[in-house]
Image (cartoon, rainbow, N blue to C red):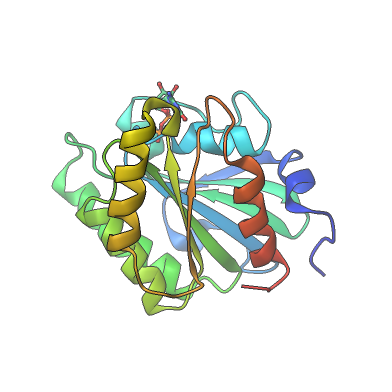
Amino acid sequence: MTSQLPLRQQFSRAGFVKEAHRLDQLPDDLGQEIAFVGRSNAGKSSVINCLCRRKNLARTSRTPGRTQQFVVFQCAADQRIIDLPGFGFAKVSKSKRQHWDRVIPRYLQTRQSLIGLVLVVDSRHPLKVEELSIVQWCEDVSLPILVLLNKIDKLNQKERAACRKFVGAELDSGSELVSIQEFSATKVQGLEQAFKVLEQWRTGEI
Ligand code: GDP
């Protein structure tokens, strides 16, 4: 049975379990899991740490090699966070990129316990082609996605409005499966609203 605790409390109990390179190395496909993905340096690790109220749960790093794995964090017995390999590294080899391109869509398509994907985007450079592909993959399999426009603290009001307009136009699918939220991991902005979306995934409302 899925733990009845709100995700906010469950996340604050998250602990590292393992790293996996292949899908068959992931924990049994039971319970619920929420995955995080993002372009290198968008702030994915900072966002996970912020949501879990931890400084160093997910390792913030500029070193590409470190994040080429699935990193599994257990929250409750039947609730997990999966930190997906980052993408968009200039220096990653072609074979690693091909591995990513193959494995991530397969994970999104086949993982039964996956209840939603959080796409962490640097709001200064929103929605590059790979990010749009990820949204498309989710829509293709009716998987809820939360696009977190991170580093919003770095934008002034005018830039924020432009970002909102651009992203709104790009993702204008009208689907309730796609949520967009401005966020700052550093200044802890957008946390309540992000948890509201995740909670709807947990309870099956979305
Ligand atoms: P990752 O590669 O996506 O996991 O990115 P990290 O979490 O390691 O963050 C990359 C850099 O962006 C670090 O220097 C973070 O301190 C910084 N960063 C992350 N989130 C924010 C944010 O919301 N605001 C600001 N100003 N900086 C951030």
Q: Which residue is at 46% across, 78% downward?
A: 142
| Front-most of residues 38 and 105 | 38
| Front-most of residues 178 and 144 | 178
- Hey, which quadrant is residue 65 in on the image? top left
Image quarter hosting the N terminus: bottom right
| Front-most of residues 131 and 196 | 196
Q: Which residue is at 79% across, 53% downward?
A: 6
* Residue 153 vertical position relative to residue 103 in the rendered view, above or below: above
Residue 27: in sight, yes or no? Answer: no
> In screen coordinates, is 105 left or right of 91?
right
Q: Quadrant holding ligand 1?
A: top left
- Hey, which quadrant is residue 49 in on the image? top right
* Residue 113 vertical position relative to residue 34 in the rendered view, above or below: below
Residue most toward the front? 158
Residue most toward the bottom? 141
Q: Which residue is at 17% across, 36% downward?
A: 90
Residue 132, image x and y in percent? Answer: 28, 60
- Hey, which quadrant is residue 34 in on the image? bottom right
Residue 81, image x and y in percent? Answer: 60, 50
Residue 59: in sight, yes or no? Answer: yes
Q: Which residue is at 49% across, 72% downward?
A: 143
Residue 75, image x and y in percent? Answer: 72, 48
> In screen coordinates, is 55 left or right of 42?
right
Residue 154, image x and y in percent? Answer: 38, 26
* Residue 42 vertical position relative to residue 142 in the rendered view, above or below: above
